[in-house]
Amino acid sequence: MTGIRKVLAAVFAGLALTLLSAAPAAARADKLKLTVAGDGAQGVTIQATYADGRRLDRVVRLVLTATGPDGQKVGPVQLEPQPEGQGFYTSGPVLSAGAWKVTVDSPAPLPAKATTTVQARPAQSPPPPKPVAVNKPAAGGSGAGAGWWPFAAAGLVLVAAAMGVAMLFGRRRTT
């Protein structure tokens, strides 16, 4: 009996150590850090990581709400993960120009909340391309590479003539 008690005690001690060592990891994973910023135009970008700095290894549900300069409200807008990186979310163009107070919430199982002020600007378009000068060829010439073909034709004619002469005089006479 004492041997069975020792085995059971060892099993329970191992089980307790396993559960206690897993508890801090689970508690650590329950905290989320949200970094909210403007995208330079009329949208918002969010980088979600674990509080200890590790990359987010699963999809979380993020909800954006915003209050604009004239009391305008946007949201709630559910954000979808973007292919740019792990834990990267973006809203797209949802804000008009001005200063916005943006709040991003993440519900359970990874609750988090971040609030920041974002300056939305009208989207910028790239400047129009500068005109490129097109140089026309001279009136008498037909381009830079057009002078080679007469020489090639003359070479072919010479080769054909040489072969014809060789065929005419190359016959053997049998007597």
Image (tube, rainbow, N blue to C red):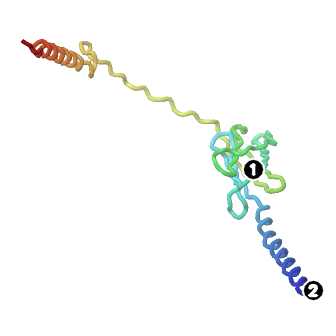
Return the residue found at the far left. 175
Residue 145, located in which quarter of the rendered image? top left
Left or right relative to 161: residue 124:
right
Of pointers 2 and 1, the one earlier in the residue sequence: 2
Q: Which residue, given by chain and number where applicable, does mark 2 sit on? A: 1
**In the displayed structure, would residue 7 be above or below residue 45?**
below
**In the displayed structure, would residue 110 be above or below residue 82?**
below
Q: Residue at x 75, y 42 (%)?
A: 69
The amino acid type of the residue labelled 1 equals: Val
Residue 158, located in which quarter of the rendered image? top left
Q: Nearer the viewer, residue 156 or 114?
A: 156
Q: Residue at x 93, y 86 (%)?
A: 1
Q: CA distance from mark 2 to mark 1?
A: 51 Å
* Percent of width and height locating residue 97: 68, 38
Q: Are marks 2 and 1 in contact (CB under 8 Å)?
A: no
Q: Secondary structure at mark 1?
A: loop
Q: Secondary structure at mark 2?
A: loop
**In the displayed structure, would residue 15 be above or below residue 77?**
below
Crowding at label 1, few (<14), some or many (≥20) Cα neighbours within 10 Å? few
* Percent of width and height locating residue 168: 12, 12
Q: Nearer the viewer, residue 159 or 40?
A: 159
Crowding at label 2, few (<14), some or many (≥20) Cα neighbours within 10 Å? few
Q: Residue at x 47, y 29 (%)?
A: 129
Residue 160: which numbered mark, if any?
A: none
Q: Nearer the viewer, residue 150 or 77?
A: 150
Q: Which residue, given by chain and number where applicable, does mark 1 sit on? A: 59
Return the residue found at the far right. 1
Left or right relative to 163: residue 82:
right
* Percent of width and height locating residue 142: 27, 15
Q: Quadrant of the C terminus?
A: top left
Return the residue found at the far front. 175
